[in-house]
Image (cartoon, rainbow, N blue to C red):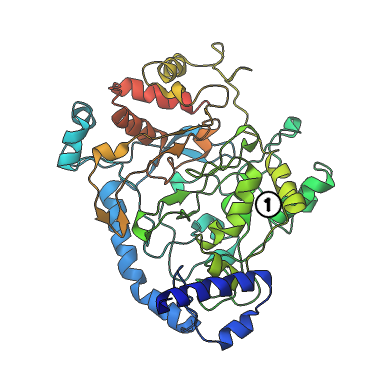
Amino acid sequence: MSMPRIIRRTGLLAGALVASGLLSLALLAQQGPVASSYGPTNQTQTFAQIKAERLAVKAERAKAHTDLLNSRYDLAIKTGPNKMSGGKAVPVGPTAKLAGATWDQLDKMTPAQIKEKGLFPYKPLPFPDHAEGGMLFPEMTIKPLPRLVRFDLDFDLPEAVLPDAAPAIYLTTRPDLGDVAKGRLITLSNYYEIFNGILNPKQLEGLRLLLTQFPQQQFNATEDRRTDRNDGMLGVTCFDCHVNGHTNRATHLVGDIRPQEFRHRINTPSLRGVNIQRLFGSQRALKTVEDFTEFEQRAAYFDGDICMAAKKGINVLERGSQVHFMAEFMALLDFPPASKLNIYGELDPAKATPSELRGEALFNGKAQCGRCHPAPYYTDNSMHNLQAERFYKQELVNGMMMAHDGPIKTFPLRGTKDSPPYLHDGRCFTLEDTVEYFNLVQQLHLTAQEKQELASFMRCL
């Protein structure tokens, strides 16, 4: 057997032994660094060395990413009169900057012409430092939870295009209560006081686990963490990204694609309406929320690297109790009320405006949205490939390959005004951007008024 194969198998065996408890991390460290087919272990570098290396490139890479965002978007975000269910103003657009053509001119061009001239305004969105990746949280979440600060990276998107900082919580079992959160960020220190008497003991335990910190690739006690903390406040919780059972649009890179430049940026989806969904993960098509919960703990938390997970202290949840309890609570998270929808999830003509009703007709007709997003929950629980790569060239931009997106899950549109930015990577900052994106990709040839009416309808959902 060749030496590289021996080293590779040794690394895999060591990872398996650590995971099973048969080999201690202390003993492994005494043996010296072990090569792994999954990447370096960083055991040859100290925390100070790793931090210095990351800080040395921070400013340069942040500037490159900021320049990219400014070249693609108008970051002076406007808001309209509509409010999210938690009270935050809904951003309006489109925010995409056009270079060399107007929306009307783009509408008249073929995909090949747009691609050749490099005019497509909604190319895949890179991570702030795509070569590095990892979980990254917006400032509005870091302020109340400072343990989530990374010394090497700052969140990139304007707060105006993010959901409420403390989103409303609606329960399928107690719709009479309305918003249970009432502007509060649910944490381990207050969940019991807020939910005791509303949830049963099993559901309370599931919520506790969703609020409990566990080690993760960038937030852990090892030398290659991306946080300065070493006070025991290490790790992340499910609800650090899925704030209040919704989302703050925290971002990271999909764990199951290699090489690094082909990995997609991931826009944290909402957990509202999990009870009606049948696919989980933007592309993984996991069949139950229990599968997804376990997958996140075992793989996504550690970028799909099982050896690094073992080193950093992976917490393997027990499927029959812990995972089950967590899933039971998540299944209670309901969509926000939509006062203009009837019991079939369609607009009530007595409550909707003429513009909203025309938007609904477009949604189910000319715009063809209803093909993938049928009422009442506005999802077909399937995956679709829009083949958007017809409109842009495959090229490396800020460490990310502008390549094919592939099949993507149809996310529910109920409550969609609460969930900017849009698409799996957040490249469409507003509903108006999303309409422009699909108008081009589906070649719908909508008029300016039709686009406005379509966005108006979606804000009713």
Seen from this angle, which residue lies furthest top? Answer: 350
Image quadrant assignment for residue 132: bottom left
Q: Is residue 358 above or below residue 49?
A: above
Foreground of the two, 173 or 370: 370
Q: Tell me the element at label 1.
A: loop
Q: Residue at x 47, y 32 (%)?
A: 81
Circle 1 packing at 10 Å, graded few (<14), some (14-19), many (20+), is: many
Image quadrant assignment for residue 398: bottom left
Q: Is residue 220 above or below residue 182?
A: below
Residue 176: x %, y % from top left: 75, 30
Q: Is residue 155 above or below residue 230?
A: above
Give the side of residue 323 with respect to residue 449, left or right.
right
Instruction: Say if residue 313 shows up in the picture.
Output: yes
Seen from this angle, which residue lies furthest bottom? Answer: 30
Residue 309: x %, y % from top left: 57, 67
Instruction: Say if residue 158 shows up in the picture.
Output: no
Foreground of the two, 307 or 448: 307
Give the mark count. Answer: 1
Disc 1: which residue: 186
Foreground of the two, 354 or 411: 411
Residue 98: x %, y % from top left: 23, 40
Q: Residue at x 61, y 57 (%)?
A: 297
- Residue flagged by tag 1: what amino acid is it? Ile
Q: Residue at x 47, y 77 (%)?
A: 6
Residue 243: x %, y % from top left: 60, 50
Give the side of residue 360 with respect to residue 336, left or right.
left
Give the side of residue 88 with respect to residue 126, left or right.
right
